[in-house]
Image (cartoon, helix red, strand yellow):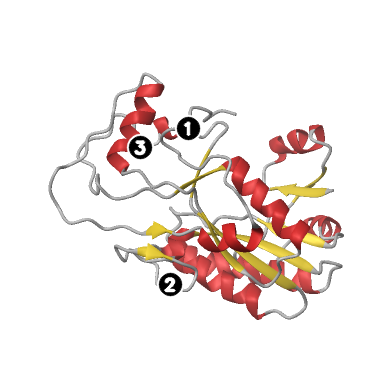
Amino acid sequence: MNGSTTRIEKMPHLVDAGIHAFLVRLPANGEMTEEMEKELIACLQADILIVNIPPGRKNPNVEQEHPQQMRYLINHISKSTIQKVIFISSTSVYHPQNTTITEHAPTEPIRGSGKALVQVEKLFQANKSFQTTILRMSGLYGGERHPGRFLAGKQNLPNGDAPVNLVHRDDCVGIIEQVMVQKKWGEIYNVCADKHPTKREMYTNAAKKLGLAAPHFTENGSLSYNLISNEKVKRELAYSFRYSDPMNDERFDD
């Protein structure tokens, strides 16, 4: 199994997990060095590729640079042995609609990172050299990502009564596995836990579990939210979420 990272210090972690590790950095502008291009070409010697390269939220040029990086990658995938791709996207591609969101909802994001992802989704879908399934992941928690740390101690936060959309790392992995096992190619799936507690409930409860200061939410103001539906992934993959309720689940660090 091949795997890549952009940081050389992470290479030993991949090796320890039994992964053939490659250092791959995709150019946003200009050309990749010959050495780095060789790394990428070698990494792509496989049948199935999982692409999990999130756009930088703080990058003011993300709408231009991230799609350019992915165009470079897609060009090399087209020349490789890769036949199937799982592209990890995000539910941030949906703009707040104050309703339940299925995979048929319009993708009109507000943030630049979400707009970049919409572009990239279309790039992968348009390429006929391979088949792509898109997984739109909700907010990730699990392992070192404990939700109690996300908003602990923060003040005057809006949208306290809005529902949260979270998914545990292990369920992300489980769904990726099932896409491959069941050969569900050319699809789009929302990936989100079953339950949607409010932000106030979720992050107050999670902070207390770690003994951290609870966040404070404003009481007034109109709500802006999405409630992400996971019905398609449960129906088509017959998948049952291991971590179905982020707030009541005590196993954050499993």
- The alpha-carbon separation of the residues under discs 1 and 3 comes to 11 Å
Q: Residues within 10 Å of mark 1 (few under 14, many from 20)?
A: few
In the depicted structure, whether residue 241 falls above or below residue 77: above
Report the amino acid beneath label 3. Answer: Met
Tag 2 secondary structure: loop
Residue at x 46%, y 40% (from the top left corner): 245
Image coordinates for residue 115, horizontal then vertical, percent: 45, 68
**Mark 2 or 1, closer to the camera:** 1
38 or 215, nearer to the observer: 215
Which corner quadrant of the image does residue 209 belong to? top left
Q: How crowded is mark 3: few (under 14 residues within 10 Å), some or many (20 or more)?
A: many
Q: In which quarter of the image is the C terminus?
A: top right
From the viewer's perspective, is 142 left or right of 83? left
Marking on residue 40 = none
Q: What residue is pinned by disc 2?
A: 105
Tag 1 secondary structure: loop
Q: What residue is pinned by disc 1?
A: 249
Residue at x 35%, y 37% (from the top left corner): 202
Report the amino acid beneath label 2. Answer: Ala
Q: What residue is pinned by disc 3?
A: 202
Tag 3 secondary structure: helix
Report the amino acid beneath label 1. Answer: Asp
14 or 58, nearer to the observer: 14
Image coordinates for residue 59, horizontal then vertical, percent: 46, 56
92 or 193, nearer to the observer: 193
- The alpha-carbon separation of the residues under discs 2 and 3 comes to 25 Å
Q: Are marks 2 and 1 in contact (CB under 8 Å)?
A: no
| Badge 1 or badge 3: first in the primary sequence | 3
| Badge 2 or badge 1: first in the primary sequence | 2
From the viewer's perspective, is 14 left or right of 167? right
